[in-house]
């Protein structure tokens, strides 16, 4: 187990290095940062001053290693626009995105697995057919459309849920949370529902397929024959085995929900990292964009490793040595 | 054990819910653009200046709706000679941190504005040769060369506190504004809202609304939903595509007024390009059916433009007429210029800057294709597009302009004069239009002190630009605002689109 973890960590570091190289390349070759830093009306002389001050006159390799050194210490440079530390700018937005992704994944996991089990038990009932047809919508309708439809229904016509923003928040240390206020919950429902739509449908279909396969296995027949209660057979004997691929997908998609919630955050004006990324791209604020990519890579790697470790918990037969 | 833990958690949640819910602000304004920084000189865009106008004051201010220049931190001002401007400062004004406002703050502000690290308002700052402060409440500026519109920009050069700004961390300076304005800064949750509280000691008297939230909502559909759900009290930048729907909402009052900004097609006359021939430029102007653009693309929410400056600008000439829509004549002119089969033309423009900018470009492309030109469309986000303009990449593009100083002389220097970085001319002349007679007229106009005489000279420059087809004015945008009824909010939109909260009653 320990060797496995070490090996995975080493692999992760290599991936991060590769990402940093790509980022650095993006950083330096997509537009001259000096033009951004010095302003539109800077003279040649002023530009040279800025170039020196930021160390942009040094050879490329030297710059890369100093960037790497800075990144190791958590210093990714300052936003061109606000002159604030790029990592701080992003981390300030992290709680909003994390909470949104968390509520979304809870929603899609509980609904997806729950409905998946229901559908698997009576595959041909009218309820199952309705649910399966509905899941097709979840997979095929793009996020922005789901979001706008939900807003039209709940905010414009019914006027029961707010269409944008995060509502009232509470500051707990460095973490600004919206999950402790009623208005925060009202505000999170629509975006979380939007964000969870696709995952919900995928998890539902995955659970259904797995359940149908497992329910035909010999050991399940044995369990029925022993006279165990349906709950025990379905939930303990069957579902537990089915959950392995489901948890994998859910875990991986959690990373994606955090890293790529851009569309949902934009529609709902959610003050998270995705929204910031989009704004930064429009403003060509390179340090923020690069830091975001590095952070996204890190989160996805981290979650990958955690998911692998969770396997062992769910199924003791899996060994990593 | 488990159950008791759950009960405890639930109880904690119930206790937390009511106490942590913050009071809603007295007034919530939704805007279409977020602030980029809270440093009042960091960006010259009207969106950013609009936020700053609540935290800071300039030496002068412009009053709604038409923008009459009025006293603010200065009570009196005069142009003593061509290059000397004297301002008498208001006494007894305090910054939000309690520091008194004096001439030293004014001097510090204009010196800081010369530093490209803090300021994009370099143009006006660098025109200042010296600043004298004979006493605490008098400032005398001397400009290097005559700048006739010097005082006209004083509503947007916001004064910062010297003592607290000098040694502050740049990050803090860029996020926590300290000014003399009608509102004190409370909180900026980026991407969410800007909260401010009334300044009870404001020199013009405390403003009506005690706490105000400004919420930038960049998505049009979301802005619409916020209005429909009564989440906000005032919206600026009502989306044109949803205009008809919003007008039918019983709880919303829609205010529509002509904006100052003129949308026009900027054109080159560079030698070696087809645009060199004035007949080609005239043909393009004749080919565009602007009335139809206003009716279809803009849904009637725009005013036909015959020239680039708007009515209140010094240099506006009511007698100027645009070239009429006449595709047959356009073809004739093209043939006469030696292009009977047209030529390849690229239409550039931003797709996220002006109302329906991309659709206007598409319409223009359609009209030009009809008279036989081979059109390529090249629209892109403003951040890339405007960078390309400074590199003079495009010969024909859509852009908008209004002059914050209400002076066409300043516009002409930036837009029509041949680009010359050393003289500070033609900074936004991205198409590389150049005409010797035009340059001479612009230079000559800047040293005329008499206002009426100067106006004549500027009108002449304006006429020359229309007759030489240096550009094709399309329309003035319409600014559309919405106010939710029921709270009895008296809101008069300003011509510059700024949301100056102290003016809302």
Image (cartoon, rainbow, N blue to C red):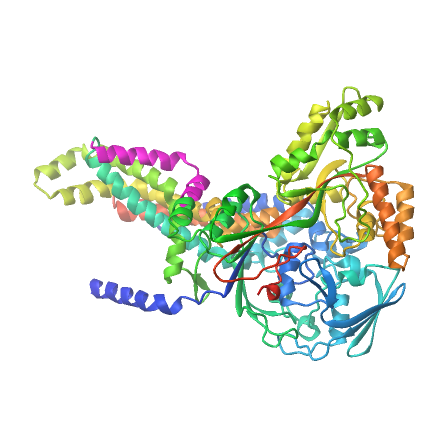
* Magenta-colored segment: predominant secondary structure: helix
Q: In the image, is residue B298 part of the stretch drawn in magenta?
A: no
Q: Residue furthest top?
A: B341
Task: Name the quadrant containing residue A133.
Answer: top left
Q: With respect to residue B226, does B9 lie above or below?
A: below
Q: Position of residue A6 (x, y in %)?
A: 41, 50
Asked if residue B137 shows in the view, the reply is yes
Q: Position of residue B403 (x, y in %)?
A: 75, 52
Quadrant of the image containing the C terminus of chain A: top left
The residue drawn where x is 85% and y is 53% is: B455
The residue drawn where x is 61% and y is 35% is: B296
Q: Position of residue B147 (x, y in %)?
A: 85, 59
Q: With respect to residue A147, does B196 lie above or below?
A: below
Range drawn in magenta: A125-150
Of residues A143 and A48, the one drawn nearer to the viewer in this rendering: A143
Asked if residue B417 shows in the view, the reply is no
Of residues B28 and B208, the one drawn nearer to the viewer in this rendering: B208
The residue drawn where x is 49% and y is 62% is: B487
Q: In the image, is residue A145 part of the stretch drawn in magenta?
A: yes
Of residues B144 and B410, the one drawn nearer to the viewer in this rendering: B410
Q: Position of residue B221 (x, y in %)?
A: 50, 45
Tell whether B164 sits left or right of B18. right
Q: With respect to residue A102, does B266 lie above or below?
A: above
Of residues B5 and B299, the one drawn nearer to the viewer in this rendering: B299
Tell whether A274 sits left or right of B237. left
The residue drawn where x is 60% and y is 57% is: B35
Q: With respect to residue A108, does B166 lie above or below?
A: below
């Amino acid at each position: 187990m320990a060797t496995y973890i070490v090996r995975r960590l080493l692999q992760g570091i290599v991936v991060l290095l590769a990402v940093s190289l790509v980022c650095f390349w993006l950083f330096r070759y997509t537009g001259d940062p000096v033009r951004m830093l010095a302003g539109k009306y800077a003279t040649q002389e002023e530009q040279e001053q800025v170039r020196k001050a930021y160390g942009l006159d040094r050879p490329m390799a030297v710059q890369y290693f100093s960037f790497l050194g800075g990144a190791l210490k958590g210093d990714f440079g300052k936003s061109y626009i606000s002159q604030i530390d790029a990592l701080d700018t992003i981390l300030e937005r992290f709680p909003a995105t994390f909470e949104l992704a968390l509520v979304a994944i809870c929603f899609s996991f509980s609904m997806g697995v729950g409905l998946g089990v229901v559908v698997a038990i009576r595959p041909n009932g009218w309820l199952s057919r309705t649910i399966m047809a509905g899941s097709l919508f979840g997979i095929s309708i793009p996020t922005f459309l789901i979001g706008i439809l939900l807003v039209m229904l709940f905010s414009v016509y019914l006027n029961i849920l707010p269409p944008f923003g995060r509502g009232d928040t509470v500051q707990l240390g460095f973490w600004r949370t919206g999950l402790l206020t009623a208005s925060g919950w009202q505000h999170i429902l629509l975006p979380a529902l939007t964000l969870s739509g696709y995952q919900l449908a995928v998890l539902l279909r995955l659970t259904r397929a797995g359940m149908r396969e497992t329910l035909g296995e010999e050991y399940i027949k044995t369990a029925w024959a022993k006279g165990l209660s349906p709950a025990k057979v379905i939930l303990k004997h069957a579902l537990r085995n089915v959950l392995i691929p489901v948890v994998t997908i859910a875990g991986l998609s959690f990373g994606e929900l955090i890293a790529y919630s851009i569309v949902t955050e934009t529609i709902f004006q959610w003050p998270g990292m995705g929204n910031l990324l989009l704004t930064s791209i429009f403003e060509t604020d390179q340090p923020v964009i690069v830091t975001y990519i590095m952070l996204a890579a890190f989160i996805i790697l981290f979650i990958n490793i955690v998911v692998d470790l969770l396997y062992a918990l769910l199924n003791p037969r899996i060994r990593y040595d | 054990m488990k159950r008791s833990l759950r009960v405890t958690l639930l109880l904690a949640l119930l206790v937390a819910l009511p106490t942590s819910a913050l009071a809603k602000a007295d007034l919530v304004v939704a805007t279409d653009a977020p602030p980029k920084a809270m440093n009042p000189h960091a960006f010259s865009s009207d969106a950013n200046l609009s936020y700053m106008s609540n935290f800071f004051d300039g030496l002068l201010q412009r009053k709604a709706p038409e923008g009459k220049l009025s006293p603010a931190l200065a009570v009196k001002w005069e142009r003593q000679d061509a290059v000397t401007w004297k301002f008498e400062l208001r006494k007894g004004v305090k910054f939000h941190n309690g520091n008194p406002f004096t001439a030293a703050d004014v001097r510090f502000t204009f010196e800081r504005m010369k530093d490209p690290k803090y300021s994009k308002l370099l143009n006006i700052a660098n025109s200042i040769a010296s600043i004298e402060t004979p006493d605490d409440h008098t400032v005398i500026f001397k400009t290097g060369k005559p700048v006739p519109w010097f005082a006209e920009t004083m509503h947007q050069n916001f004064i910062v506190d010297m003592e607290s700004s000098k040694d502050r961390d740049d990050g803090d300076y860029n996020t926590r504004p300290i000014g003399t304005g009608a509102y004190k800064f409370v909180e900026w949750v980026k991407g969410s809202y800007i909260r401010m509280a009334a300044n009870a000691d404001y020199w013009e008297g405390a403003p009506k609304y005690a706490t105000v939230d400004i919420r930038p909502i960049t998505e049009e559909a979301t802005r619409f939903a916020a209005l429909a759900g009564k989440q906000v009290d005032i919206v600026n930048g009502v989306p044109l595509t949803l205009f008809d729907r919003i007008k039918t909402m019983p709880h919303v009052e829609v205010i529509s007024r002509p904006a100052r900004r003129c949308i026009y097609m900027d054109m080159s006359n560079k030698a070696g390009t087809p645009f060199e021939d004035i007949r080609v430029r005239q043909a393009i102007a004749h080919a565009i059916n602007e009335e139809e653009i206003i009716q279809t693309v803009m849904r009637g929410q725009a005013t036909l433009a015959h020239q680039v400056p708007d009515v209140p600008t010094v240099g506006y000439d009511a007698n100027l007429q645009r070239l009429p829509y006449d595709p047959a004549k356009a073809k004739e002119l093209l043939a006469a210029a030696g292009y009977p089969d047209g030529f390849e033309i690229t239409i550039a423009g931003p797709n996220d800057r002006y109302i329906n900018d991309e659709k206007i470009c598409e319409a223009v492309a359609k009209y030009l294709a009809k008279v036989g030109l081979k059109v390529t469309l090249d629209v892109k986000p403003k951040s890339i597009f405007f960078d390309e303009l400074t590199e003079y990449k495009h010969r024909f593009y859509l852009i908008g302009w209004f002059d914050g100083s209400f002076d066409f002389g300043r516009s002409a220097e930036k837009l029509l004069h041949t680009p010359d970085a050393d003289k500070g001319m033609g900074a936004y002349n991205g198409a590389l239009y150049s005409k010797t007679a035009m340059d001479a007229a612009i230079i000559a106009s800047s040293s005329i002190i008499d206002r009426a005489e100067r106006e004549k000279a500027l009108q002449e420059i304006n006429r020359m630009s229309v007759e030489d087809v240096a550009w094709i004015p399309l329309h003035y945008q319409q600014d559309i605002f919405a106010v939710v009824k029921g709270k009895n909010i008296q809101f008069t939109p300003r011509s510059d689109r700024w949301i100056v909260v102290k003016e809302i009653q």
